Amino acid sequence: MLGESWASPQDFATLFQYFWYRDFPIDQKATGARRVDWTIHIGVVVRNIADLLGLITRFERGGRKDAVLRSAAGDEIAIEWEWKEIKKGNELEKLKDHRVWNNKNTTKDIKRLLKYAVLITYTDMASMDEVYDQVMGRWKGAKWPLLLILIDWEKSKKFSSRREFKNMQMSVFHKGKRTELRVVTAYPWRVTGTRWYSELK
């Protein structure tokens, strides 16, 4: 089994942020990325995170989760990502009710839990409080923490997706509490001091 301090939600959030900026699907001139481009981008990010954590990525596993990250002992992290807002989907319930797969060759603890679940989704900025309230209510009674990566946006005709991303809001929900981990810009060219920032025009 993984050590308690290995692959924490904070680790995942940090790696997600850095890989999110890498090989970004758009820049300030090429703004044509659509829903499928963002879906693929997140899949690549998740695969890279798993690789650095020493885990195996299984896509569309465990009751059709978008991805499950597995150790030698079994499932560790279940992940969903969704372009539509969470009030229109069942991603939270799928993560909350995940049936953990255990490798019986390496562990006899059939009641082993996930380390945590991850939901990566989007919302318009005006709906932030409503999203947090929904997650708090729907995650009540969950057996493991939830890392919510919420990318907020405003309507814009500058982008093919009609969304201009603003921030990534990362929080952990557990035992009726929300703990904010970080709020960062969603666009790499707004990260001060980076090579992407130096290309800002």
Image (spheres, helix red, strand yellow):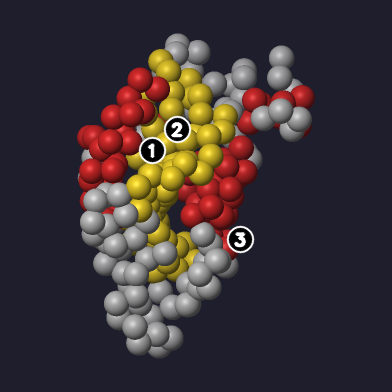
Instruction: From the viewer's side, name the closer residue of 9 and 27.
Output: 9
The answer to whether marks 3 and 2 mark residues whose Cβ atoms lie closer than 8 Å is no
Residue at 38 percent across and 80 percent down: it is 103
Find numbered disc 1 in the image and state the secondary structure of the residue it sits on: strand
Say which of marks 3 and 2 sits in front: 2
From the viewer's perspective, tell me whether residue 87 is left or right of residue 28: left
Report which quarter residue 157 is drawn in.
Answer: top left
Upstream in the sequence, badge 1 or badge 3?
3
Q: Which residue is mark 2?
A: 151
Picture layout, residue 110 above or below residue 137: below
Report which quarter residue 24 is drawn in.
Answer: top right
Callout count: 3
Q: Which residue is mark 3?
A: 52
The answer to whether marks 1 and 2 mark residues whose Cβ atoms lie closer than 8 Å is yes
Q: Which residue is mark 1?
A: 121
The answer to whether marks 1 and 3 mark residues whose Cβ atoms lie closer than 8 Å is no
Picture layout, residue 116 above or below residue 190: below
- Quarter of the picture holding the C terminus: top right
Residue type, mark 1 in image: Thr
Residue type, mark 2 in image: Ile
- The x and y percentages for residue 140 are 24, 51
